[in-house]
Amino acid sequence: MKNYDDIINLPHHVSKKHPQMSMLDRAAQFSPFAALTGYGDAIDEAARVTEEQIEIDDSERQEIGHVLREAYETGCPVEMTQFVPDERKAGGEYTATTGVITALDSVNRTAEFQIKA
């Protein structure tokens, strides 16, 4: 076993050539090292949850069309929910917007929608 009695009470050495390192820089020496750049982002992306798009049948389409026509004729605000596909992986997410239908096209199955502010 070593005995350090001869050096234990000596003053701390301060270099005359090199400036003292800041506490922030000293702490950075012990920060975690990411050997694979972007690996953490890839893990986060894989863990991100997306939803599958729900397919509706013809009876549900007819019911939606009826509700849209009624809302268009009365000018009542409606909440429209649409599926937005994800750009990076399978699936997507559903978003809801409230507004008033300003035009309906039953041939092309489209609706113009003015969002309420």
Image (tube, rainbow, N blue to C red):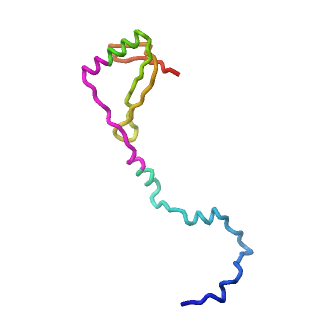
Residue at the far top: name it. Answer: 73
Q: Residue at x 39, y 17 (%)?
A: 111
Image coordinates for residue 2, horizontal then vertical, percent: 56, 89
The quadrant holding residue 62 is top left
Image coordinates for residue 38, horizontal then vertical, percent: 46, 53
The quadrant holding residue 74 is top left
Q: Residue at x 67, y 64 (%)?
A: 22
Left/right placement of residue 27 relative to residue 75 reads: right
Q: Is residue 16 above or below residue 51?
A: below
Q: Is residue 38 above or below residue 113?
A: below
Q: Is residue 50 above or below residue 9?
A: above
Where does the magenta region start and end?
44-63
* Magenta-span inclusion, residue 39: no
Image quadrant in which the N terminus is located? bottom right
Image coordinates for residue 103, horizontal then vertical, percent: 42, 13
Residue at the far right: name it. Answer: 16
Q: Residue at x 25, y 20 (%)?
A: 59
* Magenta-span inclusion, residue 48: yes
Image coordinates for residue 56, horizontal then vertical, percent: 27, 26
Q: Residue at x 32, y 19 (%)?
A: 64
Left/right placement of residue 103 relative to residue 11 reads: left
The quadrant holding residue 106 is top left
- Disc tally is 0
